Structure formats: C-alpha cells, structure tokens
Image (cartoon, grey):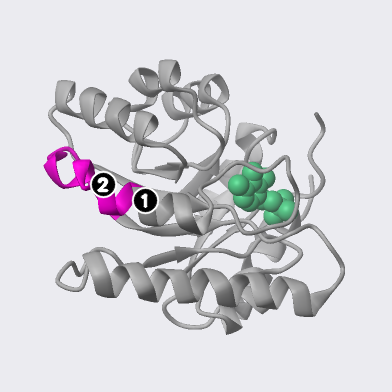
Amino acid sequence: MYDVKGNLKQVLANLPQGVRLVAISKYHPNEYIEAAYAEGQRLFGESHEQELRQKHTTLPQDIQWHFIGHLQTNKVKYIAPYVTMIEAVDSLKLLREIEKQAAKCDRVIDVLLELHIAEEATKYGLTPDDLRQLLADGEWREMQHIRICGLMMMASNVDDEQQIRGEFQQAKQLFDEVKQQYFADCDHFCERSWGMSDDYKIAVTEGSTMVRIGTTIFGPRIY
Ligand SMILES: *Cc1c(COP(=O)(O)O)cnc(C)c1O
C-alpha cells in the first residue's frame, strides 16, 4: 500500500493552524481510508454518489463525508440523510433540491457555493456574476435546511504559479465581498475551500481554510 500514514502526517505538518484537511478518497479502497482514519483523520471527500454510499455504509460512522464533485439533482436524496457538507453547489436548482431533501430528513445541510474562476471551460461552478446574482436573488434566505458556509473553487490546472495564486486571490476577494454584503453577521460563513495536491501550499498562503487533497496522501487514482 501507498504510505498513507506517512503522507498524511507530512501534509498535516504543512498546514498552518486553522486550515482543515479534507482527505479526498475517491477511487481509493476502504483500506486506504482506514489507514488515514487510524491516524485520526475523520474528514473525507468523495465525488460519486454510489461510491460514497458504499463507503459510508461500510466504514466507521463517525467519518464526516464531504461531497466534492458535481452533484446531479436526482442524486441529492441519496446523500441527504448523512452527508456533512456539499461543497460544490453551482446552481439555484441544486440548492433548492438540497433544501427539499434536507427538510425531508429533518436536517440542516452545510453547503459551499462553487466558484468558477479557472480558465478551463470544462469546469463547473458559478462565475463571479452568477454568484452575485444568486445571492442578490435572495431565495436562499428562505431555505431553513441549508447553511451556506462559504465558497469552494478549483484553480486552473497549469504550471504557472502566478496564475494559480491570482485565481486564489480573486476567490478570496469575492469571499470578502459577499461576506460583507450578505453574511457579515453569520459566523458560519467562514470557509474557503481551495487547494489540492499540486497547489495547496499556494492556497494556504492565500487564505484557504480547507484543502482537498487526494493524490499526495493516497497516491495516483486507478480509474
Ligand atoms: C479529485 C479532487 C480533488 C483532489 O485532487 P488531488 O489532485 O488528487 O489532490 C480535490 N477537489 C476536487 C473537487 C476533486 O474532484
């Protein structure tokens, strides 16, 4: 097995105080998750509903699961009973469905709004103007079963460190803007989920509060 424990320790040692690690375990077997769990890691991220369901039912129940991938509205009902956070909300339609399913489970589900800043056209997420529009529209204020806890984003997959840094800075600026405008009194609107294996060291210098790291801990994924 990949040296999950050693890698996990290394990553944790690189994180400043106050930055949480979401260990991204997608495509990795339970044994890998159990190794990280044995080191005390409780926060894991998955991006496919069926795989998450499988892992949730077979692994320790005190694991907190973040759904980090693109979520189809018809899948929300399956994860609503147990998911801790849905990180990549990119439409009002999805927000409405989470509200509906969370209400059915009599839960409040934490969510992040996913920003699209990166250049890649294939990435999901709200443009800065989409984000402003969604918040200005105000329907989210009526949703009693979701709690908007911050923003999530993926930087461009490029080697240019300045570009990546610039995208994180843009995300931080938008966070500050909407925090001030809509969430000034909400202590729970505090999460900035950015930073992955290749760029988390940059992300933590640019205000990330939560990094999502897979490959560096668990090794390459076998698809
Ligand atoms: C897979 C994935 C990650 C982890 O990527 P690594 O490069 O393996 O660290 C982080 N965030 C999202 C949204 C992902 O889909």
- The foreground one among 46 and 202 is 202
Magenta span has 145? yes
- In the image, taking residue 214 as reference, residue 182 lies left or right, namely left
Residue type, numbered disc 2: Asp
- In the image, taking residue 115 as reference, residue 202 lies left or right, namely right
Quarter of the image for residue 217 reads bottom right
Q: Residue 161: x and y, percent?
A: 80, 77
The quadrant of the picture occupied by the N terminus is top right
The quadrant of the picture occupied by the C terminus is top right
Label pair 2/1, CB-CB below 8 angstroms: yes
- In the image, taking residue 110 as reference, residue 46 lies left or right, namely right
Magenta span has 201? no
Residue type, numbered disc 1: Gln
- In the image, taking residue 129 as reference, residue 201 lies left or right, namely right
Residue 137: image tag: 2
Vertical arrangement, residue 19 with respect to residue 55, above or below = below
